[in-house]
């Protein structure tokens, strides 16, 4: 008798699990390859789309940059002209104020000179008057003193 059995060979539990895992693994590998291909295709289409949009954005950015540069230069020019106008007005006002101050200072000097001249004239007048009064007083005193001397001499001589 032979040792081989005539029954069909039955697979064991672990062999069935092994085959099931192999089938799952093969299916997973196939699905992974399909997903990889789909992702690559999608990535390429997105890259093309982004490249097109990037060119459009670059063109718009260039146009926008030119507009912004122009507006900035216009604003700077306006600011410079305004500053120049303000500076010119300030210079004119400063000159006017300086001229006014000089005029007022000259006027004050003239007035001070007039007051000084009047004071000098009045002082001369008072001095001359005092001198004349002093001279008159001296003459009067001298005359009275002379008369008193004569009276004293007469009185001394009469004694």
Image (cartoon, grey):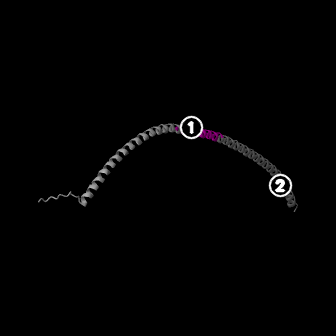
Looking at the picture, does residue 149 appear above or below residue 51?
A: below
Q: Mark 1 points at which residue?
A: 74
Rendered residue at 34%/46% (across/down): 34
The residues tagged by marks 1 and 2 sit, at their Cα atoms, a distance apart of 98 Å
* Residue situated furthest right in the rendering: 158
Residue 111 horizontal/vertical position (percent): 74, 45
Q: Name the residue under label 2.
A: 141
Foreground residue among 11 and 133: 11
Left or right relative to 86: residue 53 = left
Foreground residue among 146 and 153: 146
Residue 103 falls within the magenta-colored stretch? no
Magenta part of the chain = 69-92
Rendered residue at 37%/45% (across/down): 38
Q: What element carries label 1?
A: helix
Q: What element carries label 2?
A: helix
Callouts 1 and 2 close, C-beta under 8 Å: no
* Residue situated furthest left in the rendering: 1
The chief SS type of the magenta part is helix
Instruction: Give the quarter of the figure containing the C terminus.
Output: bottom right
Residue 78 horizontal/vertical position (percent): 59, 38
Foreground residue among 71 and 39: 39
């Amino acid at each position: 008798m032979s040792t081989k059995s005539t029954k069909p060979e039955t697979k064991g539990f672990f062999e069935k699990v092994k085959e099931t895992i192999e089938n799952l693994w093969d299916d997973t590998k196939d699905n992974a390859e399909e997903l990889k291909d789909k992702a690559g295709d999608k990535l390429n289409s997105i890259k093309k789309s982004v490249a097109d949009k990037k060119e459009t954005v670059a063109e718009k950015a260039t146009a926008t940059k030119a507009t912004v540069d122009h507006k900035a230069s216009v604003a700077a020019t306006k600011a410079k002209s305004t500053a120049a106008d303000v500076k010119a007005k300030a210079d004119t006002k400063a000159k006017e104020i300086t001229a006014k101050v000089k005029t007022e200072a000259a006027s004050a000097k003239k007035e001070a000179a007039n007051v000084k001249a009047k004071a000098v004239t009045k002082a001369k007048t008072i001095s001359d008057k005092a001198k004349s009064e002093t001279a008159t007083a001296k003459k009067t005193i001298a005359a009275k003193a002379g008369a008193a001397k004569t009276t004293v001499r007469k009185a001394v001589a009469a004694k």
